[in-house]
Image: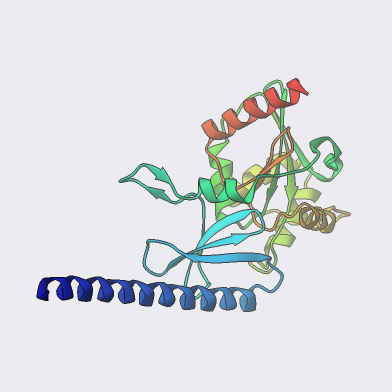
Amino acid sequence: MKTTRLITSILATAFFAGSAFAAGDALKETAVLATLKQKYPSTVIKSVSATSLPGIYEVVMGKNVAYVEESGRYFIFGHLFDMQTQTDMTEGKIMAEQVQKTDFNKLPTQDAVKIVRGDGSRKVAIFSDPDCPYCKQLENNIANLTNVTIYLYLFPLEQLHPQAKAKAVGVWCAPDRAKAWDGLMRRNEAVSGQCDNPIDRNVALAESLGINGTPTVILPDGSIIPGAPSSAKLDQMLNNALGKVAKK
């Protein structure tokens, strides 16, 4: 009887301790959600969930998934991996949110910086912010991507990067836009200038597509992919998307 009572006591203690931790997580999630909504009122934040990393929370913003610490100041965009189980913790969440799509052929390519490499046979659109570190990472990732036409939509996130719009306008007004963009993103060579530009239209376009983060990639089949894929990954995605388009 004493053994039975002891086991029952241990189980009850474990149950209530687990409940307390769960309740604590829920309270923290609610607090972080409130903080993010207060700090970034124009950003659509769908949910906040505790991760297995202390003090780090998963945030779903539209179709984007990011990670943030409690203050809401620092965001990590990318995939979270559990190396012990060899599991991509982010991929499932992105799939659960479903890949958003648009009609690639209806994108206003006249408002994009056109960059052609090789025969330019594969097409991709990229929304990018001149001051976004992950956008610079993407530029490095795809520097050697060949046989592609890139439609680059200058999309400065002024709330995060107050100087980004002026840099974006400078790139658009440069004699060689592709060269100006490469110099800015890979060597920090900012250019200045004023002219009629599509920056405000690009911001409105991004909003209409549900894009609220950079970089964001749009594949030929219309799939909208947030983040900075590697050159190999983007190469694979482009080929897969072209296969889907060819089957239509």
Q: Residue at x 62, y 58 (%)?
A: 131
Q: Position of residue 126 (x, y in %)?
A: 69, 43
Outermost residue toward the front in this view: 1
Q: Position of residue 128 (x, y in %)?
A: 67, 50
Can residue 187 be seen? no
* Residue in the foreground of this view, choosing between 180 and 149: 149
* Residue in the foreground of this view, choosing between 235 and 54: 54
The picture quadrant where one finds residue 107 is top right
Q: Residue at x 47, y 76 (%)?
A: 28
Q: Which quadrant holds the N terminus?
A: bottom left
Q: Residue at x 27, y 75 (%)?
A: 12
Q: Residue at x 59, y 42 (%)?
A: 139
Q: Position of residue 48 (x, y in %)?
A: 54, 67
* Residue in the foreground of this view, choosing between 137 and 79: 79
Q: Position of residue 218 (x, y in %)?
A: 70, 41
- 141 over 54 or under it: above or below: above
Can residue 214 be seen? yes
